[in-house]
Image (cartoon, rainbow, N blue to C red):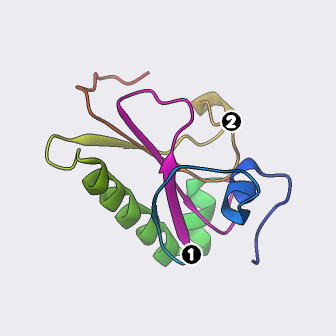
């Protein structure tokens, strides 16, 4: 697949080299359970193609950015938090605590969220 890095954790999950508990998958997007959940529902939604952050993905492929968001909504529905509410989070850069530099959307729910978040 074009735009894949063999050194990226999430690219390796897409390739099947690292197992993941898949929640939903399309031809271009993968949603799976976070291994370090911060709430009862914590799903990561990633494009299968490697982009380092949300802005880069949105500028390069706006349709893919839309699919990531649509898949996040589907993951919330599958996880049963669509009616009660959920939070979508894109961390971009080290100051935002992004630790894997492959764009990913956190779908967090199953409990009341506080504000401000961090």
Q: Position of residue 12 (x, y in %)?
A: 75, 56
**The magenta stretch spans residue 43:** yes
Please tell me whether residue 18 is drawn above or below residue 86 in the rendered image: below
- Name which residue lies at 69% across and 42% down: 100
Left or right: where 113 falls relative to 60: left
Magenta region, residue range? 28-52
**The magenta stretch spans residue 76:** no
- Name which residue lies at 27% across and 26% down: 113
Please tell me whether residue 29 is drawn above or below residue 43 in the rendered image: below
Left or right: where 48 falls relative to 26: right
Q: Position of residue 62 (x, y in %)?
A: 50, 74
- Name which residue lies at 43% across and 71% down: 67
| Whole-number angstrom distance, CA of label 1 to CA of label 2 | 23 Å
Find disc 1 in the rendering and name its residue: 61
Disc 1 residue crowd, few under 14, some 14–19, many 20+, Cα 10 Å: few
**Number of marks present in the image shown:** 2
Compare residues 35 and 44 and report the one nearer the observer: 35
* The N terminus lies in quadrant: bottom right
Left or right: where 118 falls relative to 82: right
* The C terminus lies in quadrant: top left
- Name which residue lies at 76% across and 71% down: 3
Q: Circle 2 — which element?
A: loop
Please tell me whether residue 90 is drawn above or below residue 69 in the rendered image: above
Q: Nearer the viewer, mark 1 or mark 2?
A: 2
Nearest to N terminus: mark 1 or mark 2: 1
Left or right: where 48 falls relative to 88: right
Q: Position of residue 114 (x, y in %)?
A: 28, 22
Disc 2 residue crowd, few under 14, some 14–19, many 20+, Cα 10 Å: few
Find disc 2 in the rendering and name its residue: 99
Q: Circle 1 — which element?
A: loop
């Amino acid at each position: 697949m074009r735009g894949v890095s063999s050194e990226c954790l999430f690219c390796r999950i897409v390739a099947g080299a690292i197992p993941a508990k898949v929640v939903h998958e399309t031809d271009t997007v993968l949603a799976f359970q976070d291994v370090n959940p911060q709430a009862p529902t914590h799903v990561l939604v990633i494009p299968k193609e490697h982009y380092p952050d949300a802005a880069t993905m949105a500028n390069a492929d706006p349709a893919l950015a839309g699919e990531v968001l649509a898949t996040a909504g589907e993951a919330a529905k599958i996880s049963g938090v669509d009616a009660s509410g959920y939070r979508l989070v894109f961390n971009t850069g080290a100051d935002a605590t992004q630790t894997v530099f492959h764009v990913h959307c956190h779908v967090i729910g199953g409990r009341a969220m506080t504000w401000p978040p961090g």
